[in-house]
Image (tube, rainbow, N blue to C red):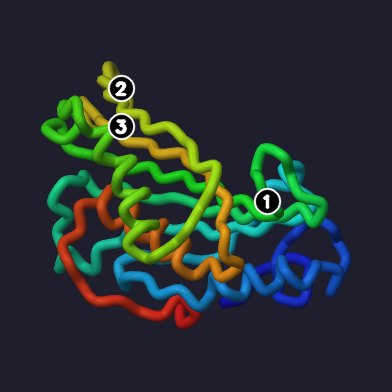
Amino acid sequence: MSQPGAGENGADTGTGQVGADPAPFREAVDSMHTATVRPEIEIGTIRPPQRLAPYSYALGAEVRTPESDVVPENSEGETFGRLILLYDPHGHEAWNGLMRLVAYVQSDVDETLAADPLLPEVAWSWLTDALADRGQEVTALGGTVTSTSSVRYGDIAGPPRAHQLELRASWTPLDPDLSGHVEAFSSVLEMAAGLPPAGITRLGSV
């Protein structure tokens, strides 16, 4: 997987210095590319935020169903997200560590799912269960789940009613190998999109 930016691994850290990235940060980025994700999930590098930490890296992901062969069970079809790695070699008190992962997932959902009062709790469990299932130990985990509904009036394109789910979360990984965290993030996308069980593909081959 290639991408623009500075650093030996191609990560855009905002430093503008080729090869200046600290080894722990480079190794963490490399480990993210050893993750495996489902073939319906298109994932690649995107430009990270520049002011949240001295070093940052980001992946963007979108769920795509191949030629309607796979029909999502609970989604209207639009599910995407991003996973950002922040690194501060001096540490950050609020993080309780040197690294921080920040995740964002947004998905269109059907009216029935949007009306479920337990949806926020269920959506949050997608993340916590996905991390636990992969044996990922974390600290300072926090976030929000938001379910919204909108009604379109007049000459505005789109369905008359739309329902969206948003999950925002951040946590500090206790293991520098972040492949399991990428896979957990991918699992949340799968659940939000309502995909049925399917095969997987190597992230590095995307």
Residue at label 2? Answer: 155
Q: Which amino acid is tagged 1?
A: Gly
Residue at label 3? Answer: 157
Coordinates of residue 60 in the picture (x, y in percent): 50, 57
The residue lying at 55 percent from left, 42 percent from top is: 140
Query: Tags 2 and 3 in contact by the CB under 8 Å rule?
Result: no
Q: CA distance from mark 2 to mark 3?
A: 7 Å
The residue lying at 72 percent from left, 69 percent from top is: 24
Tell me the element at label 3: loop
Tell me the element at label 1: strand
Neighbour tally class for label 3: few under 14, some 14-19, many 20 plus, Cα within 10 Å: few
Quadrant of image for the N terminus: bottom right
Q: CA distance from mark 2 to mark 1?
A: 50 Å
Q: CA distance from mark 3 to mark 1?
A: 46 Å
Residue at label 1? Answer: 97
Q: Quadrant of residue 55?
A: bottom right
Q: Which amino acid is tagged 3?
A: Ala
- Judging depth in this view, the residue of 162 and 32 nearest the camera is 32
